[in-house]
Amino acid sequence: SCVTSPSPYHTRCPRETLRAEGVYGPRSRHRAEVVSTGGRLVFPLLVDRTADVVMNDSAVICEHLWAVYGNDLERPTLDVVLNTRKYTKSLLVDFPLLAAPSALRPWPWSGLMLAPSKANAQPLVLYGCEADAGSRLVREALCSLQL
């Protein structure tokens, strides 16, 4: 259900809605785990046990993944432009790139609504492509279910 303020003309901002749904509040199952692993509550967080690193800046994570797992492949130009600080150094450029996908998706199906969950006995593995709409829907469901 939509969370609204007492005023009929004002709905809560996305941050307040996310907090009300428990996405980054004390109800989130992953909050304590992220703080103990990364030292602070910042997302995304990558724990790479193969390379023995923990990092939480998306640009740094992308650089790390390409450097360690790219197997000397040439990185796609669009990925370089969108996911490195070389080209997106200002909030004026970063914010629209970050906000547009959330603004274009319907909220209940976009991974922004939290559902109660339990930790899996075995980890889940998702094989997919960022550009594939089906993979995005699956990832959003996994996020909603905190899996």
Image: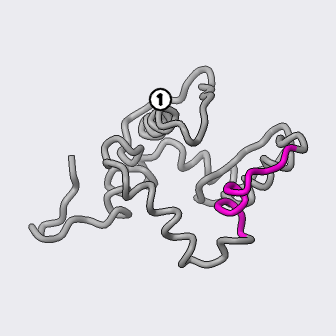
Q: Residue furthest top?
A: 122
- The location of residue 124, given as percent across then percent down, is 59, 25
Q: In percent of the image, x 42 and y 50: which residue is there?
A: 23
Q: Nearer the viewer, residue 70 or 113?
A: 70
Q: In percent of the image, x 31 and y 43: which residue is there?
A: 108
Q: Is residue 146 visible?
A: no
Q: Nearer the viewer, residue 128 or 61?
A: 128
Q: Is residue 80 magenta?
A: yes
- The location of residue 37, given as percent across then percent down, is 69, 49
Which residues are drawn in magenta?
Answer: 73-85
Q: Quadrant of residue 59?
A: bottom right
Q: Residue furthest front?
A: 77
Q: Amino acid at mark 1?
A: Lys
Going by the image, does 144 lie left or right of 60?
left
Q: Quadrant of residue 77?
A: bottom right
Going by the image, does 45 lie left or right of 138?
right
- The location of residue 118, given as percent across then percent down, is 47, 29
User: Where does label 1 land, which residue?
Assistant: 118
Q: Quadrant of residue 38?
A: bottom right
User: As displayed, is residue 142 above or below residue 77?
Assistant: above
- The location of residue 32, given as percent across then percent down, is 57, 48
Q: Is residue 135 visible?
A: yes
User: As displayed, is residue 77 above or below residue 127?
Assistant: below
Q: Residue furthest right?
A: 72
